[in-house]
Amino acid sequence: MTNTSDKTIGFILKGYPRLSETFILNEILLLERLGFKLHIIAMRNPGETAVHENLKRVRAQVTYIPDYFWPFFFAFIKANMRLWWRKPGVYWSAFSFALLRSLRQFSSSTIKRFAQAAYLVENHLHNQRDGRFEHIDVAHLHAHFSHGPTTVAFFASWLTGTTYSFSAHAKDIYLQEHDFLRDKIAHARFVVTCTEFNKNYLQKVSGNAASIFRCYHGLHLEAFSAPRKNHPNAVPNILSIGRFVPKKGFPVLLHALHELRQQGLQFHCRIVGSGPMKDELLQLLSTLQMRDCVELLAPMPQEKLLEHYRAADLFALACEVQEDGDRDGIPNVLVEAMAMGIPVVSTAISGIPELVEEGVNGFLVPEKNSEALAAAMSKLLRRPELALRLGLAGRAKVESEFDALRNVERIGELLRGAQASEAASPSLRAHKERVNGVAFKHRFEMAPSSAGNS
């Protein structure tokens, strides 16, 4: 089914394009394939030198709004003053909300996002007579990640009455203050999240809102259908991919690999990624004397990453939950590895058990437990027939539940509903309440809660 509306959906992103956010690129391409007209509104250009080949297929135009406040201070002030002049009542109700939130959090985050929303509204969503800014005729806004981008959508909706929705993923959910997250859910046309675990959590935060839907990220399965290279007599290849941050558990993986070596197993491991823990991981490799069998590779486009998938005999990812609650949802690299028929070992946290079923299509071990991780990897390396069986079952699981088109079609249905019922949306009703001070008064009569990202 294709979309027949010529209305534009504004896609608000933290950064675009990003090599690590293949799932967003896939979603954009599939929504365009379904007939949606998109305009990407990005808060930052990451300036990455490596990009995915599929980026060339995106038809949507891209508009960047400033993400750094002080270098664009006067541009922000000018846009905010013009918006205040045009809509004083609406502007001051939204500004007061943002200011009090920032004061309560001892953080400038919310007021910064409000300033960005005002800049977006005045310079791009409001039809400027002088034509100095590109006008985006947006009928609905959809943001990816429930913190910064959704906060911009939340205030842009407040200032214009345009409906909005958002997709929530991982860190943006669990490190955010509940009160503001609850507000964003309440006033959104709908909310999409990528795991059942996330959906249950968001429903608890929101008080059981009915507008929250689970849609797995999924893959273009045809891109992951090439056979892997099997070399029965070669040294096994272990693969892991992820950002070098604590929640990925790479130190645990390195200790597990050291245990495998102590058992006398031969292997070669490639870990693809980058991040603040790189130096720590390199030092640990030296301490464990494993630089000869483990190498760290820089991030790369998916076309090149597929070559490493094809050569892999085992995929391992030691995800863990941090003390502040930060965690993964379902890492996309696990889905990709299983789509390639690679047996996987990971941890039983968050939404991962929704993908990896213990002993059926992979192994799950307790988090932060290098001994258990080593034992599971050892079992697969020593029993190739078991590895083959789990790998085939993993591919079947991805085919049945993680097909990208099937999941994006559900998002498309929700977006069509938002386009078709703008006048009846909870976002517009909330907008009228805010102008009258109702929602504003109610929220700040509530007891303060712990601060979080917004």
Image: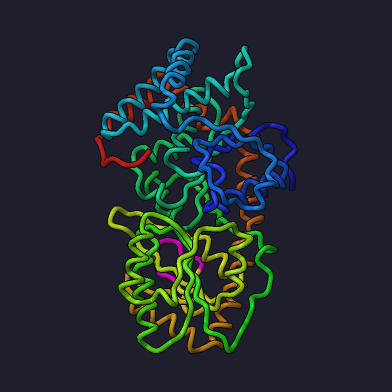
**Residue sitting at 36 percent across and 58 percent down?**
277
Q: Relative to 15, say whether 287 is above or below.
A: below
Residue 129 image position (x, y, % from top left): 62, 12
In percent of the image, x 46 and y 34: which residue is there?
187
In the figure, 371 relative to 436: above or below?
below
Total numbered labels: 0
Considering the image in quadrants, where does the C terminus appear? Answer: top left
Q: From the viewer's perspective, is 356 left or right of 310?
A: left
Camera-side residue of 358 and 148: 148
Q: Quadrant of residue 400?
A: bottom right
| Depth order, front residue of 209/112 | 112
- Magenta-tinted stretch: 346-355
Residue 235, position in %: x, y?
52, 84
Q: Is residue 70 left or right of residue 120?
A: left
- For residue 279, above or below residue 381: above
Residue 350 lies in the magenta-colored region: yes
Q: Is residue 38 left or right of residue 183?
A: right
Residue 373 in view (yes/no)? no
